[in-house]
């Protein structure tokens, strides 16, 4: 009997202990944040899904689609029944004919419940006499992805996630500023260089704070970018850019070489900055754990960390650049172009960007490592 009572007491105590662990202060704060974030996310979801009244353009909702086969199996004719969702004609119904192809390159295959922008023409009495489809309303899908991203980064990352999100928003504003300044006649090289420096400094300071670790990452990123661009310029000058095809940039009104270098610099900064902050954080942590660590051991340990990060980052750059060309690659393959032609000419610039970005990633490891060792040397280290 005593054994049974004792067993029940143990079970009860274990349940109470588990309950206390689950609902302790730290976990309780997490649950509160999760509920608040999910609630805000749902509110944002319903707002984006029903934001037609905030648009000046007329928006219609497709309520029925009748389809018939076109002249070929790759084309179909659509008869769309729509209802206007905003403006003074809200509630009125319109009908449209749409031609949809299998490739969807120049047209859209509309579905029921899709939202579309509509242009209408009125008579003197304000009645609709003609209308046509302007395009597809895509903001809600982008909004849904943005909501999921924000909720997850805040829920999982906490304060760090908030800092990262702030950094993303600030960098978007910086990028927008570059475009606006260029449209007003400012030199693209100058404003891009200045904005890139601001981008690096703000991104690292927001995420890591104002400290020597951030300083090491900033200096390491800057030095690595400069060296990478110098290497690229030297190689392009010596080879006279042979093997580099700028055909996809021929429609631009400025030098394609200039645009290529600017895009290369912006694209490479992200990878190098990631490596730089990783290396400076690793060395800073090693110093914190053991202020008397020998410099030789410190360098060996940080290099091992750098090698692991280098492999994944190089692969990331390759996949990021190449993935954007997948639709073009499939299109060319479908039209009978050889894979060697596509690689050699079609995605030539993407391959070069990936290779140069990988060079930047590789050289940023020893550069940031030695800069961090020098700038953090005020801590007591062991035998040199």
Image (cartoon, rainbow, N blue to C red):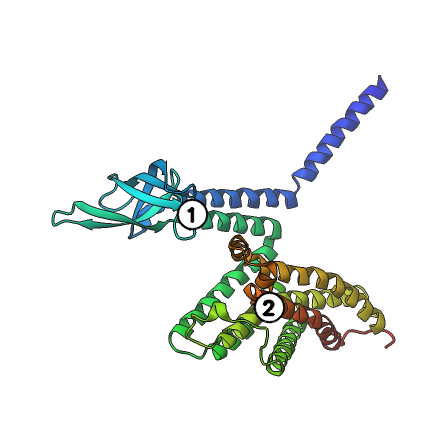
Q: Is residue 373 left or right of residue 90?
A: right
Foreground disc of the pair 1, 2? 2
Q: Position of residue 185 (x, y in %)?
A: 39, 78
Query: In 3D space, how far apart are the residues under numbered discs 1 and 2 (Cα atoms)?
Result: 33 Å
In the image, 112 versus 213, the foreground residue is 112
Q: How many marks?
A: 2
Which part of the image, by quadrant, shows the C terminus? bottom right
Picture residue at 64% right of the left edge, 59% below the top: 316
Which residue is labeled 1 in the image? Answer: 140
Q: Which mark is residue 346?
A: none
Q: Is residue 315 left or right of residue 246?
A: right
Report whether residue 288 is seen.
Answer: yes
In the orientation shown, which residue stands out farthest toward the left?
Answer: 124
Under circle 1, the secondary element is helix
Q: Residue furthest top?
A: 1
- What secondary structure is marked by label 2? helix
Q: Nearer the viewer, residue 320 or 5?
A: 320
State whether residue 305 is above or below residue 151. Answer: below
Q: For residue 199, what is the image quadrant?
A: bottom right
Name the residue at 54% across, 42% down. Answer: 35
**Identity of the residue furthest to the right in this view:** 383
Report the front residue among 384 and 5: 384
In the rendered image, residue 260, in percent from the top left (x then y), is placed at 53, 72
Classify 10 Å Cα crowding around label 1: few (below 14), some (14-19), many (20 and above): some
Quadrant holding the N terminus: top right
Q: According to the image, label 2 marks what residue? A: 353
For the point 82% across and 68% down, which residue is it?
A: 300
Q: Position of residue 249 (x, y in %)?
A: 47, 70
Q: Which is more N-terminal, label 2 or label 1?
A: 1
Residue 109, percent across and down? 40, 44
Residue at figure coordinates x 85%, y 19% from the top left: 2
């Amino acid at each position: 009997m005593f054994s049974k009572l004792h067993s029940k007491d143990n079970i009860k105590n274990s349940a109470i202990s588990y309950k206390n662990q689950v609902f302790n202060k730290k976990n309780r704060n997490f649950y509160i944040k999760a509920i608040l974030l999910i609630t805000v996310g749902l509110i944002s979801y319903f707002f984006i899904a029903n934001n037609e009244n905030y648009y000046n353009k007329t928006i219609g909702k497709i309520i029925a689609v009748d389809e018939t086969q076109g002249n070929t199996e790759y084309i179909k004719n659509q008869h769309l029944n729509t209802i206007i969702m905003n403006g003074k004609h809200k509630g009125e119904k319109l009908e449209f004919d749409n031609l949809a192809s299998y490739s969807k390159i120049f047209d859209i295959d509309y579905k029921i419940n899709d939202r579309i922008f509509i242009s209408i023409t009125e008579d003197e009495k304000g009645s609709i006499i003609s209308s046509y489809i302007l395009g597809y309303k895509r903001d809600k899908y982008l909004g849904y992805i943005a909501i999921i991203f924000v909720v997850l980064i805040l829920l999982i990352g906490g304060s760090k996630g908030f800092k990262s999100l702030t950094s993303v928003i600030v960098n978007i504003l910086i990028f927008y500023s570059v475009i606006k300044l260029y449209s007003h006649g400012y030199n693209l090289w100058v404003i891009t260089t200045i904005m890139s420096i601001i981008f690096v400094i703000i991104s690292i300071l927001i995420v890591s704070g104002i400290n020597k670790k951030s300083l090491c990452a900033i200096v390491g990123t800057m030095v690595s970018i400069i060296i990478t661009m110098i290497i690229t310029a030297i190689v392009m000058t010596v080879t006279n850019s042979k093997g580099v095809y700028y055909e996809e940039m021929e429609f631009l009104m400025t030098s394609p070489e200039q645009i290529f270098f600017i895009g290369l610099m912006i694209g490479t900064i992200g990878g190098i900055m990631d490596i730089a902050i990783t290396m400076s954080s690793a060395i800073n942590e090693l110093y914190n754990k053991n202020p008397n660590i020998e410099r030789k051991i410190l360098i060996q340990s940080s290099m091992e960390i750098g090698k692991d990060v280098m492999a994944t980052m190089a692969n990331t750059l390759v996949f990021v650049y190449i993935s954007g060309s997948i639709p073009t690659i499939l299109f060319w393959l479908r039209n009978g172009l050889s894979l060697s032609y596509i690689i050699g000419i079609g995605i030539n610039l993407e391959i070069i960007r990936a290779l140069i970005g990988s060079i930047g990633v590789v050289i940023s490891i020893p550069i940031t490592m030695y800069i961090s060792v020098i700038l953090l040397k005020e801590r007591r280290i062991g035998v040199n």
